[in-house]
Image (tube, rainbow, N blue to C red):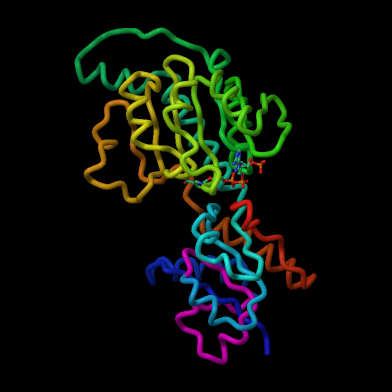
Amino acid sequence: MSPLIALVTRLSEAAESNWLMALSAAMPQETIRSIRQLSPDELGRVDIAIVANPDPADLERLPNLKWVHSLWAGVERLVLELKGLSRPIVRLVDPDLARTMAEAVLAWTLYLSRDMPAYDMQQRQSLWRQLPYRSAPDTRVGLLGLGSLGRAAARQLRLAGFAVSGWSRTEKQVDGVETYFGADGLDAMLRTSNIVVCLLPLTAETTGLLGAREFALLPANAGFINFGRGRIVKTIELIAALDAGAVKHAVLDVFETEPLDEQSPLWDHPGVTVLPHISAPTNPSTAAKIVANRIDEYRATGVPPDGIDFDRGY
Ligand code: NAP
């Protein structure tokens, strides 16, 4: 009997059926079905699960499962919920997603570097005032995270003329980027970054990484962009840093709880731009092709791709 691929999600039926269409179009030779529709016999034929926010109990219903491909780039929820699963879990690494994120990093870096929040405020007060201009080469952008997204963002920022620094867990060399690593490296990078962009995964080490101490290291009038995960930042300490002027403006796309609570002080804070987690949405058609390539390779070699490192957390 030929193997089956199960789509395992806690998405709405409509969202799941969109994914089924994209995945089936990318690999017409495979039979891909929602786990919701599989009979007990068919569950036994599944060797690969494609997942998006899966219920861990669903994966336990697949006795012959060999590996799992996630449709998302972030894996903190899988790391937490699927720790006991002994099969590899592969995350989405999509160059199209990296391009989209790099575009967002450039757009919101320019928003801060060209003082758009201040000009918006001035217009509301009918105020005609020209603020000092600081050029891109005189503006250093510090990227937290030099993974697939951080490196794509670095390339885009350099093309736009910005001075770029980057921080990672292990030592890295990236063309044209001043690189830092480890705890000492973080402090050194923050001290020289006019705009800090967070593109880190949420792990035990990065939870609450950025608070009062870190924001106090930034040069005057620094901007902050969080496109990684909300819990990397201590929100109350960020608000205090904004109130004290240690951070001039923050662009936040990710939050401790999403959607952002209606009562959150971030909504009305004049130093905060709130975005509804839109910096880099997954594109089902390009993501489906990436998953299809991984599955083709597995069918040809019988070797599952490398999975995420549960101990490292990403
Ligand atoms: P990735 O390729 O795994 O890269 C992660 C980077 O973070 C690596 O450079 C890694 O260092 C660094 N890092 C991890 N832990 C660290 C630590 N404790 N100290 C210093 N550096 C650390 O991940 P990615 O594909 O670039 O994605 C990054 C994150 O972006 C995802 O996990 C997800 O949370 C977020 N994301 C957000 C959106 C959105 O729409 N807002 C969309 C997609 C993804 P090494 O290089 O040394 O390993």
Is 165 placed left or right of 53 in the picture?
right
Is 151 placed left or right of 266 in the picture?
right
Residue pictured at 61% horizontal, 68% vertical: 68
Q: Nearer the viewer, residue 128 or 267?
A: 267
Point out the image quarter for the N terminus. bottom right
Is 143 placed left or right of 266 in the picture?
right
Q: Quadrant of ligand 1?
A: top right
Q: Nearer the viewer, residue 186 or 62?
A: 186
From this view, report whether residue 251 is shown above or below residue 312: above
**Residue 63 placement: quadrant:** bottom right
From this view, report whether residue 115 is shown above or below residue 80: above
Is 187 placed left or right of 13 in the picture?
right
- Residue 198 appears at what percent x and percent y? 51, 36
Residue pictured at 26% horizontal, 9% vertical: 128
Residue 33 lies in the magenta-colored region: yes
- Residue 9 appears at what percent x and percent y? 46, 69
Q: How many marks?
A: 0
- Residue 77 appears at what percent x and percent y? 49, 58
Residue 179 lies in the magenta-colored region: no
Residue pictured at 68% horizontal, 68% vertical: 295
From this view, report whether residue 47 is shown above or below residue 126: below
From this view, report whether residue 271 is shown above or below residue 131: below
- Find the residue positioned furthest to the left: 125
**Residue 86 placement: quadrant:** bottom right
Bounds of the magenta segment: 30-54
- Find the residue positioned furthest to the right: 301
